Image: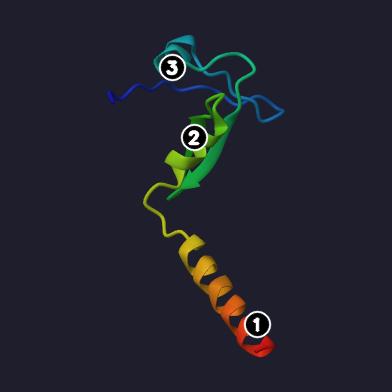
Amino acid sequence: MSKMGTTMTMGPKGQIVIPAAVRRAVDLQPGQRVDIEVRNGVVVLTPIPNDLIKYLAGKYKGTPSPLKDLIAEHAEEVRRDEEGRL
């Protein structure tokens, strides 16, 4: 991705206008939601696509998932319950 930047001034309500060239570069549309994060002291804006599930799947790709642990824990609980009934 090429680097694009400009300097803007924040208004009294904390609002910043994103220049049209930047909006076009990331296909940001009016009314579209934006994820705001602070990473190492830098504010990062990420447009949230209309397909939120696809966005979240990509956002958390590569992070450890507790799902396997939860499934294993549940299976162990079921096994103990079954043993208690016999």
Location of the N terminus by quadrant is: top left
3 or 29: nearer the viewer: 29
* Numbered disc 2: secondary structure: helix
Mark 2 Cα shell of 10 Å, populated few (<14), some (14-19), many (≥20): some
Contact? badges 2 and 3 (CB < 8 Å): no
Of 5 and 73, nearer the camera is 73
Q: CA distance from mark 2 to mark 3?
A: 20 Å
Q: Which residue is mark 1?
A: 81
Query: Which label sits on residue 6?
Result: none
Residue displayed at 64% across by 17% down? 31
Residue holding disc 3: 22
Structural crowding at the residue carrying mark 3, measured as other residues with C-alpha within 10 Å and reported as few (<14), some (14–19) or many (≥20):
few
In the current view of this chain or complex, which residue is farthest to the left?
2
Q: How many labels were placed on the picture?
A: 3
Q: Amino acid at mark 2?
A: Tyr
Q: Of callouts 1 and 2, which one flags the residue occurring earlier in the amino acid sequence?
A: 2
**Type of amino acid under label 1:** Asp
Query: Residue 55 — which label?
Result: 2
